[in-house]
Image: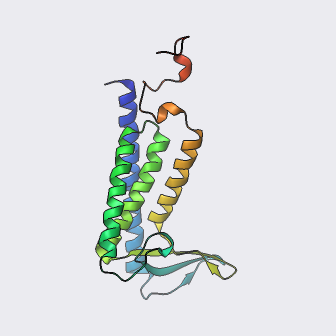
Amino acid sequence: MTRGAMRADGAAKVGIAVAILVVALDQASKWWMLEHVMRPPRVIELTGFFNLVMGWNRGVSFGLFNTNSPYNAWVLSAIALVIVMALAVWLRRARSPLLAAALGLVIGGALGNVVDRLRFGAVFDFLDLHAAGYHWPAFNLADSAITVGAVMLVVDSLFARPENHNGKGDGSSGSEKGANGGP
């Protein structure tokens, strides 16, 4: 096994561990909120800008495609699983632990919301940020993981070294190449 392949395997393990952790924490937080905190359903004001609420999103981000169609949960879950499979291929090729962690956050968040869709027909959201009477759409830990992972992917794409992305070479920096630019 080459050094580059070992780096990719190590990075993939980081991403898989992050994804598993996100799914576990997301589902545990939703269980706790549903079974203990939101009985009965109510708004719990924690600060002047943050509440705990009970919301169900049958659509995607910001409530887009939020219809009462009985097929929403299945169609959106299928789309999410296709995206997760594509991200898993990317994760398998990732050589940077930061990139792998970012992909793990997005994968874990997507899978956490798929579990909700298949269990409840909607995603359970309970975090409510607001200011001056305007409320951000309610969200959950899975949504937060997806957002943080997406931001990390952007940062990684802007600032990471190219050898962490192209899957070529042994992971060494360009300065180790010969004088003619070759290997």
| Residue 6 versus residue 118 in the image, above or below | above
Quadrant for residue 68, please give it: bottom left
Taking depth in this image into account, of 145 and 38 the one nearest to the observer is: 145
**Residue 23 as seen in the image, left or right of residue 175:** left
Report the colour scheme.
rainbow
Q: Which residue lies furthest to the right in this view?
A: 132
| Residue 145 versus residue 176 in the image, above or below | below
Residue located 51% across and 72% down the image: 62
**Residue 129 as seen in the image, left or right of residue 96:** right
Taking depth in this image into account, of 55 and 35 the one nearest to the observer is: 55
- Residue 111 percent coordinates (x, y): 35, 61
Residue 24 in sight in this render: no
**Residue 84 as seen in the image, left or right of residue 161:** left
Residue located 35% across and 71% down the image: 116
| Residue 150 versus residue 134 in the image, above or below | above
- Residue 139 percent coordinates (x, y): 50, 71
